[in-house]
Amino acid sequence: MKHIQIDNLNFELFIDYEQIKKRIRLMGIDISVKYADKNPVFIGVLNGCFMFMADLMKQVHVPCEVSFVKLASYEGTQQDKINELLGVGMNLEGREIVIVEDIIDSGNSLQYTIAALERLHVASIAVCALLMKPDCLQHEFDNIMYVGFEIEKEFVVGYGLDYKGQCRNLRDIFKNVPESNK
């Protein structure tokens, strides 16, 4: 599948699953080396991380634990009005944490997640993201350690990323193609 259409938006293949798998394998090797003998906790940020995290965890070969969180905001507020981190469900004090994100865009939700975890007195926090849009970042981070692909200000779907809840199940990542580029 090279093209998809959702509502009136057209998308073309951007990053295929074979490229994604190769990059995740390399990330898994790096993480396994860095966290040997540290028993890290991988915390996936739902909903978008689920496909990436599943594939990443298959490539991490050190003892570790896995948990998930979901960011909650009040209905009708903007994305940067995050009010709660839901679901960790375990004691993280003194633990090495790896936050797993599908995409880092503005960095607002990542900043909130890091602050919430720091309040739990964790030992360290590293961030592992499949995609990052450096030109969109509104915050500075010194703990983004693993990035699969840096992309421009692309509107992307697939491999966990959605548009109105759709397309998370696609193996590949697609980018929006404006009408004028057709």
Image (cartoon, helix red, strand yellow):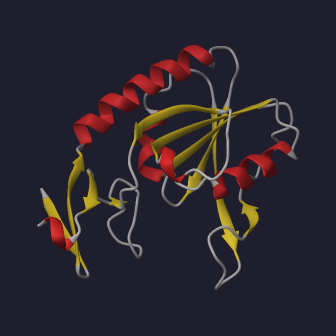
Q: Find residue 158 and report its horizontal and vertical position in percent.
A: 32, 58
Q: Find residue 107 and report its horizontal and vertical position in percent.
A: 62, 52
Q: Look at 63% across and 53% down and name the residue there.
A: 138
Q: Look at 69% across and 24% down and name the residue there.
A: 39
Q: Look at 88% across and 47% down and name the residue there.
A: 119
Tell me the quarter of the picture where residue 8 sits: bottom left
Q: Quadrant of the N terminus?
A: bottom left
Q: Look at 58% across and 56% down and name the residue there.
A: 106
Q: Is residue 103 visible?
A: no
6 or 85, which is in the foreground?
Answer: 6
Residue 144 shown left or right of residue 47 in the figure: right
Q: Find residue 41 and report its horizontal and vertical position in percent.
A: 68, 35
Residue 153 shown left or right of residue 79 in the figure: left
Q: Is residue 51 visible?
A: yes
Vertical order, 81 against 173 (above or below): below
Taking the view exactly as shown, the residue that stands out farthest to the bottom is 76
Residue 57 shown left or right of residue 86 in the figure: left
Vertical order, 148 against 27 (above or below): below
Q: Quadrant of the C terminus?
A: bottom left
169 or 153, which is in the foreground?
Answer: 153
Q: Find residue 140 and report its horizontal and vertical position in percent.
A: 67, 42
Residue 13 shown left or right of residue 169 in the figure: left
| Image label count | 0
Tell me the quarter of the picture where residue 81 sits: bottom right
Vertical order, 33 against 44 (above or below): above
